[in-house]
Image (spheres, rainbow, N blue to C red):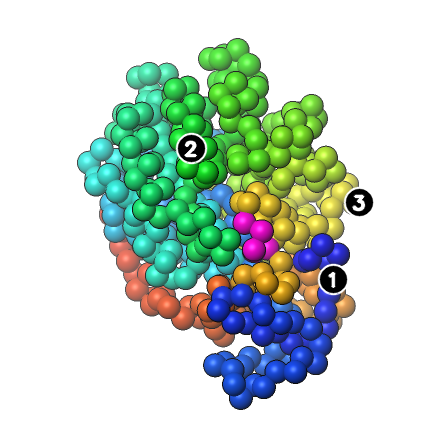
Amino acid sequence: MNENRERIKNADMLIDDGKILEMGRSLNIDQNEADRVINGRDYFLFPGLINLHHHFYQTLTRNLPDAQQVELFDWLKYLYPIWSRLTPDAVYYSTLLAAAELLKTGCTTTSDQFYVFPKSQPKNLLDYEFDAAKEIGIRFHGTRGSMSLSEKDGGLPPDSVVQTDEEILKDSRRVIEKYHDNDPYAMQRVVLAPCSPFSVTEELMIKSIELAREYGVQAHTHLAETKDEEKYVMDRFGMRPLEYMEKLGWIGNDVWYAHGVHLNSEELQKMADTGTGVSHCPVSNMKLSSGTAKVPEMIEKGVPLGLAVDGSASNDSSNMILEMKAGFLLHRLVHGMMSITAEDVLALATNGGRDVLNQPAIGSLEIGKAADMFMVSSKRLGYAGGLYDPVSALINTGDTQIVDYTIVNGEIVVENGELTRVDEEEIIERANSISAEMTKEGIK
């Protein structure tokens, strides 16, 4: 996935100090001097996938029966009270769970938008995400999300999960100073991410983008996801969602939006001209019946665009390879046979994420880039009879999306389909236990 999308066969690669040091055919490498040698003869090697939008805590509330047949606003109103029971353990283990699913499906870099801070819990919940991401070994762009506009003030969330603007900005500054790393190969960065136009105040949006630019970090929010949101913004502010964002200063190459489903052609051109990005979440958009983003037009216009699984209560998985397949099929169906290729979708999940996150050291396999990648064996039942195009094989075929190896920053974090740094059984047991406790009053 370099600029020319080259495909190299029968090649070697040398990784050192978290970076790709050499790659190509017949390299003169003394394997006896290597700490580890992997025989990749029968494997496909791909750049690590980049997930641009998630809500890790939602792994604990997926498949709830009463949330399966409702669209976004009613879905949120049902789930907010359950999410108000989040604890530090819930945040920590949901992060391990989501990151584990991502790593096992080839994702090496992820963003997460965490915005639920129950009044009854410690104020430093986001720290548990950063700690868990470091433990499992995923490259992490953690967002300090926020909600400050409760139902009584005309917003959507209940008062139990909102904070004051002052609380949010103080903690945002703390999190940036504690965790953000500007190094090109950074494993952890911080993003400021007020949740949405219907859950935060106008003042908080303005102060958040000002604070982000003061520190040189990125900003992220939901935008143009549903027609309900569009109507809410039109009724409350008298303008379309993107126009409202522009008024608040939320446009530019340091900003990206989740979804961008209901943006018109003129708005997409403005996004392209200003370098404002989008994380496309096809499975979530389909499951919540939110609509279909104009992805082929975004690609044609040059809108910075990547792929994302979205929260696990609206997906309900963190499977980046399946997300690629869903995106490929959705746009073939809606926009036509010639609208997108499998390689285009892989580009969104690699180069696209790289560009939106402004971290050029990731997103492709090239000398000097971060050693983020995954390997899948070509000798799989699901690939048999279809080895002619490795990219199409990855996205369109297969009987599993669990990869054989995932390497992040030069470290093997998945080997033979198993996580290497954490106890998978413990994650499953703890996540199920915490989920049962959180949802016991919500399941009828």
Task: Report helix, strand or loop for mark 1.
Answer: loop
Q: Main secondary structure of the magenta part?
A: loop
Q: Tell me what residue is drawn at x 30 percent, y 61 percent.
A: 429
Residue 214 has which mark?
2
Q: Secondary structure at mark 3?
A: loop
Instruction: Calculate the distance from the C-alpha at mark 2 to the C-alpha at mark 3.
Output: 43 Å
Task: Give 15 or 227, whichever is nearer the viewer.
Answer: 15
Q: Quadrant of residue 31?
A: bottom right
> Residue at label 3?
338
Q: Which residue is mark 1?
A: 6
Q: Is residue 396 visible?
A: no
The residue type indicated by label 1 comes to Glu
Amino acid at dot 2? Glu
Lateral position of residue 147 relative to residue 412, left or right:
left
Among the two numbered marks 1 and 2 on one chain, the one whose residue lies closer to the N terminus = 1
Which quarter of the rendering shows the C terminus?
Answer: top left
Q: Magenta region: which residues?
A: 359-363
Q: Is residue 223 left or right of residue 138?
A: right
- The number of callouts visible is 3
State yes or no: residue 29 in magenta.
no
Left or right: where 256 falls relative to 300: left
Position of residue 439 relative to residue 266, above or below, is below
| Residue drawn at x 21%, y 41% as measured from the top left | 122
Which tag is nearer the camera, tag 1 or tag 2?
Answer: 2
Query: Is there CB contact under 8 Å for labels 1 and 2?
Result: no
Q: Nearer the viewer, mark 1 or mark 3?
A: 1
Residue 213 image offset from top left, x and y in percent: 45, 33
